[in-house]
Amino acid sequence: MTEIILHHYDLSPFSEKIRLALGFKGLPWKSVKVDAVPPRPMLDALTGGYRRVPVLQIGADVYCDSEVIFRALERLQPAPTLYPSGEGVAKALSHWWDRATWKPAIGILVDYIGEHLPEAFLKDRKESYLGYDISKDAMAPMLPAYVQQMTAFAEWLDSMLAENGDYLTGGKLSAADLTCHHSLWLLRANCGAEAIDAQLRLSPAVTAWMGRIAAVGHGQFSDMTPEEALAAARAAEPADSFAADADPTGLNPGARVTVTPNDNARVAVEGRLVAADAQEIVIARDSAETGTVHVHFPRAGFEVLAAAATARSAA
Ligand SMILES: N[C@@H](CCC(=O)N[C@@H](CS)C(=O)NCC(=O)O)C(=O)O
């Protein structure tokens, strides 16, 4: 099997979801560490400039965003499934959690450790990623509101566990568990579990569930250099593993399109449309460093437009 390569950094909670998913599926993987602050020229060569982490690479196929990475892993190895209660509930829960908790979680995080974050990190997050200032001083006035949001959401997790048993969507772990774990993991790991459990009123059921998710582990992995990852892309042909029915907006294969996240880090990646359905879009890109790669994105949370239309709307 072609190697599974994860481009990530340790403190990235969205990467933690994927490390756990690889452990859960028992898939061995290669770890390529990227800097927490761009530039990341070798990763850009693979993705066409998508500016977030994690990115998963399997040969000449590159998957941007944790949702489509889950989908790729599920295709590669269906069992054990990440969707034991169906895809809809797990994906909807994940989409809500990722978007609703990210700003509150960062606000609480910087209250504990904000003074240790380098200036370059804060500048990058404001100017190129989130669009707002995440320094401790800037976020402090809203701290009570962030705690209120996280406390409300944590009670919903408790209610799901009371209803469903060991995991959020039922008796078996799903993608929703790996997602809802991630921002609490970030806070407990960096601010102290005891302090966070008390501040966010995490119930014993929620903390026991956190323990069950952490126990999944990251599976078997070893380091790889970014140069080796680029060589792996060059040596491979993109796979035809994605059987697309059709793009819901009538974009045709071969069309030049841009794909842009609709929440933050709004960098457009341009390429030739290869395949699309309601859940996933694949574009082809060519470069000397990588050869031809297929770059995959989810549809939910991303805007796909004809490249000419993007140019017009930017003008
Ligand atoms: N929707 C994306 C969100 C990814 C995301 O925001 N990742 C953070 C790190 S946890 C990031 O990219 N931060 C800015 C950066 O590292 O450049 C996903 O699910 O993968």
Image: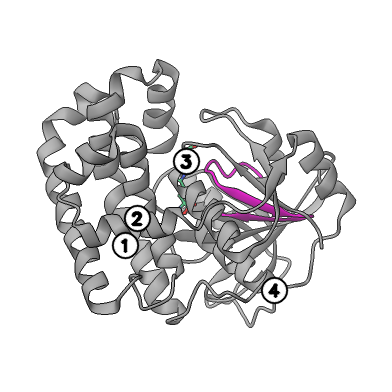
Asked whether mark 3 lies closer than 8 Å to ligand 1, one says: yes
Q: Earlier in the sequence, mark 1 or mark 2?
A: 1
Look at discs 3 and 1 and give the one toward the viewer. 3
Residue 283: percent from left, percent from top: 68, 60
Name the residue that disc number 2 marks: 210
Name the residue that disc number 3 marks: 12
Residue 24: percent from left, percent from top: 56, 63
Name the residue that disc number 4 marks: 242
The magenta region covers: 48-64
Looking at the image, residue 99 lies above or below residue 76: above
Query: Which residue is found at the position 63% from the left and 35% from the top?
Result: 33
Looking at the image, residue 153 lies above or below residue 87: above
Rendering quarter of residue 160: bottom left
Q: Nearer the viewer, residue 74 or 312?
A: 74
Name the residue that disc number 1 marks: 96
Look at discs 1 and 2 and give the one toward the viewer. 2
Cβ–Cβ below 8 Å for labels 1 and 2? no
Q: Earlier in the sequence, mark 2 or mark 4?
A: 2
Residue 71 inside the magenta-drawn segment: no
Cβ–Cβ below 8 Å for labels 3 and 2? no
Q: Nearer the viewer, residue 90 or 218?
A: 218
Asked whether mark 1 lies closer than 8 Å to ligand 1, one says: no
